[in-house]
Image (tube, rainbow, N blue to C red):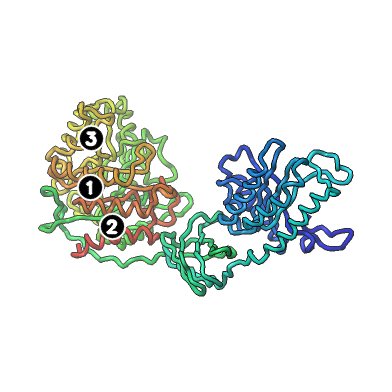
């Protein structure tokens, strides 16, 4: 249609001034699209396509107007908002003409583009309402009124036909034309020009020159429709600046200016800007002493100095020890990881340090470091060497590590595999003598190991901050937590008997017993952390998870409650050992939440945090909570708190 050549005039349709514009679809609707998303996307695509070929004609979308549909008329390639009004034989002409007026005015004020309307009524009313409709419509800032009557010439007898021989109809049409011509001076737009922008990483200043005093609204967003806005009331003719805050770094934004004042208005073309990358904050350098970190009362101590830390988690970095089948992994990436962690102020990293497999036929062939125990009797030296290298690299970068002996979950084998080795059900693990024997063998394999890189026995290496007995232990078979408490006491005492130098904790999520003394997880934050051989308490918190869905105030209260009860009831330090916010949740803007949770923890007197989790930029997996050390937005959050904690240089 756009590229057609008129066989009569020779004009190409796309440049023919006889054409006012293109209506994409008369009466556009989609009953299966209740929120209008599909129709909006279609109109955006089609109007943009028409504009790419025809830059001189209006693009119109002839759909009904409703209060939740005006955004579709704001599309940059839709030039005119358009609606229809029809008076049936039983309808009130005054009411319909009133709708013509109110809808025109609403669209004009909401969209700030020319307003068009199609108006029809029964044949009996035509002559009497024609000029009234025009007066109402043009008086309400309408621009294009189409009298939509069928039936002239050979269709003169059809329902709703227009009798052009009727003097009253001719009179009404003439008055309408005269009225339209007389209104032209009332549609002088406010001139908007010289739009420019200066963008920072999280804000932008938009400069604009307007031709007369007006209220300004800056509409902006990453894509159309532009639903976010800032306003400047009472702007004066000339140069003005509107400021936007809360933007995302390194992001392309679209914007336009709407001006309105008195009987005049104007809307600019859609322009764009891009925010800058976030600059990395300088961090305080810190060193690591040769002291073993100890817990005394509710504080950690490095020798005689109180020790607090900002830390993180990483479960996969050890797998860079050997090249995999694709040859993509190497030890240098381990060193880079610890170097970047130290640069961000992370002093303690909780490493993934377990992997159990039922037998040799089930080993992970893609990653030789994946499985530490292959069946109950074989300890995989390559896997232990990968941890050796990680510990040595951490030491070289002044970073300490937390190791866990196994996992409650099956991702790397864990408790389910121990139970299968012993021929029992998973939750028999906590009481079964054979399972206990296997677990103590794992403890022995770590605490008595000599690091193949440094030559230092693990039990003698202060690089190890502490041992987690397990990641997130649970015993659903014993909701009283009695079995778990006894297991924790026995295993932590065993660790201390083999390695009296290092701290031991549970690795628990932090469930409390109910008032009736039960809990589905079979763990108790107070009871399980009370044994003398447990040095500090841990909890994990994910506010945005579907089974939590905590508000900001609830999250703050929970964090403060853990610290208060941990300090008062167990008399020991408290560590928020895992916490995280997923990417892309509008309800949980990630940077603000990570910042708030970290700050609230330390403000309440907490002793150490380990964010879940830190990754390198080449890692493309994870659960959505991860942050890359290359992302300055997040690193600046951690650097801010680490700088305060590390300001003494340790």
Give me the C-alpha separation between circle 1 and circle 3. 16 Å
Near-viewer residue (588 or 104): 104
Q: Which residue is mark 2?
A: 346
Circle nearer the N terminus (1, 3): 3
Q: Which residue is mark 1?
A: 575
**In-image side of 469 versus 4 (left or right):** left
Q: Which residue is mark 3?
A: 512
**In-image side of 178 versus 366 (left or right):** right
| For discs 2 and 1, the disc positioned in front in the rendered view | 1
Circle nearer the N terminus (2, 3): 2
Other residues around mark 3 within 10 Å, as few (<14) / some (14–19) / many (≥20): many
| For discs 2 and 3, the disc positioned in front in the rendered view | 3
Near-viewer residue (66 or 647): 66
Residue for point 71% across, 60% down: 180
Circle nearer the N terminus (2, 1): 2
Residue for point 46% across, 62% down: 231
């Amino acid at each position: 249609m756009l590229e057609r050549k008129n066989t009569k005039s020779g004009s190409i349709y796309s440049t023919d001034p006889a054409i006012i514009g293109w209506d994409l679809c008369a009466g556009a609707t989609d009953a299966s699209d209740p929120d209008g998303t599909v129709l909006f996307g279609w109109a955006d695509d089609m109007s943009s396509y028409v504009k790419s070929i025809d830059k001189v004609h209006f693009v119109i979308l002839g759909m009904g107007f409703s209060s939740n549909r005006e955004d579709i008329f704001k599309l940059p390639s839709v030039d005119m908002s358009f609606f229809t009004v029809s008076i049936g034989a039983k309808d009130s002409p005054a009411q319909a003409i009133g709708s013509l007026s109110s809808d025109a005015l609403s669209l004009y004020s909401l969209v700030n583009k020319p307003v068009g309307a199609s108006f029809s009524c029964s044949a009996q009313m035509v002559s009497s309402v024609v000029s009234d409709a025009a007066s109402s419509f043009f008086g309400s800032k309408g621009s294009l009124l189409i009298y939509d009557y069928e039936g002239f010439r050979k269709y003169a007898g059809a329902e709703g036909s227009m009798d052009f021989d009727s003097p009253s109809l001719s009179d009404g049409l003439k008055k309408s034309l005269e009225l339209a011509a007389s209104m032209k001076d009332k549609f002088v737009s406010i001139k908007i020009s010289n739009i420019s922008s200066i963008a920072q990483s999280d804000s932008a200043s938009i400069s604009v020159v307007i031709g007369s005093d007006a209220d300004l609204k800056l509409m902006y967003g990453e894509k159309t429709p532009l639903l976010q806005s800032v306003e400047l009331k009472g702007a004066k003719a000339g140069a003005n600046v509107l400021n936007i805050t809360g933007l995302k770094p390194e992001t392309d934004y679209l914007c336009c200016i709407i001006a309105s004042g008195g009987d005049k208005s104007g809307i600019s073309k859609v322009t764009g800007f891009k925010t800058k990358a976030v600059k990395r904050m300088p961090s305080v350098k810190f060193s690591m002493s040769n002291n073993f970190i100890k817990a005394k009362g509710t504080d950690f101590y490095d020798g005689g100095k109180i020790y607090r830390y900002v830390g993180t988690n990483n479960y996969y970095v050890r797998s860079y020890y050997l090249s995999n089948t694709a040859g993509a992994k190497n030890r240098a990436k381990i060193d880079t990881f610890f170097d970047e962690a130290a640069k961000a102020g992370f002093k303690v990293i909780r490493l993934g340090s377990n992997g159990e497999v039922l037998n040799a036929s089930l080993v992970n062939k893609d990653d030789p470091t994946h499985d530490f125990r292959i069946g109950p009797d074989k300890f995989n030296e390559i896997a232990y060497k990968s941890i050796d290298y990680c510990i040595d690299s951490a030491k070289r970068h002044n970073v300490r590590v937390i190791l866990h002996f196994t996992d409650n979950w099956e991702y790397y084998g864990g408790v389910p595999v121990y139970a299968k080795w012993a021929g029992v059900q998973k939750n028999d693990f906590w009481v079964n003598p054979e399972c206990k024997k296997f677990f103590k063998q794992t403890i022995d394999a770590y605490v008595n190991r000599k690091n193949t890189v440094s030559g230092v026995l693990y039990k003698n290496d202060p690089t190890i901050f502490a041992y987690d007995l397990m990641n997130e232990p649970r015993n659903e078979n014993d909701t009283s937590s009695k079995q778990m408490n006894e297991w924790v006491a026995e295993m932590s005492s065993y660790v201390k008997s083999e390695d009296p130098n290092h701290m031991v904790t549970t690795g628990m999520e932090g469930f409390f017993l109910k008032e009736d003394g039960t809990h589905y997880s079979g763990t108790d934050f107070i009871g399980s952390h009370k044994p003398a051989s447990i040095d500090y308490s841990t909890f994990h918190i994910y506010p945005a998870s579907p089974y939590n869905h905590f508000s900001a105030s609830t999250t703050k209260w929970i964090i403060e409650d853990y610290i208060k009860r941990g300090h008062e009831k167990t008399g020991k330090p408290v560590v928020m050992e895992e916490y995280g916010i997923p990417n892309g949740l509008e309800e949980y803007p990630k940077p603000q939440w990570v910042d708030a949770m970290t700050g609230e923890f330390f403000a309440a007197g907490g002793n150490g945090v380990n964010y879940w989790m830190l990754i390198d930029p080449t890692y493309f997996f994870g659960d959505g909570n991860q942050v890359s050390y290359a992302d300055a937005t997040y690193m600046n959050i951690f650097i801010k708190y680490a700088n305060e904690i590390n300001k003494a240089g340790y």
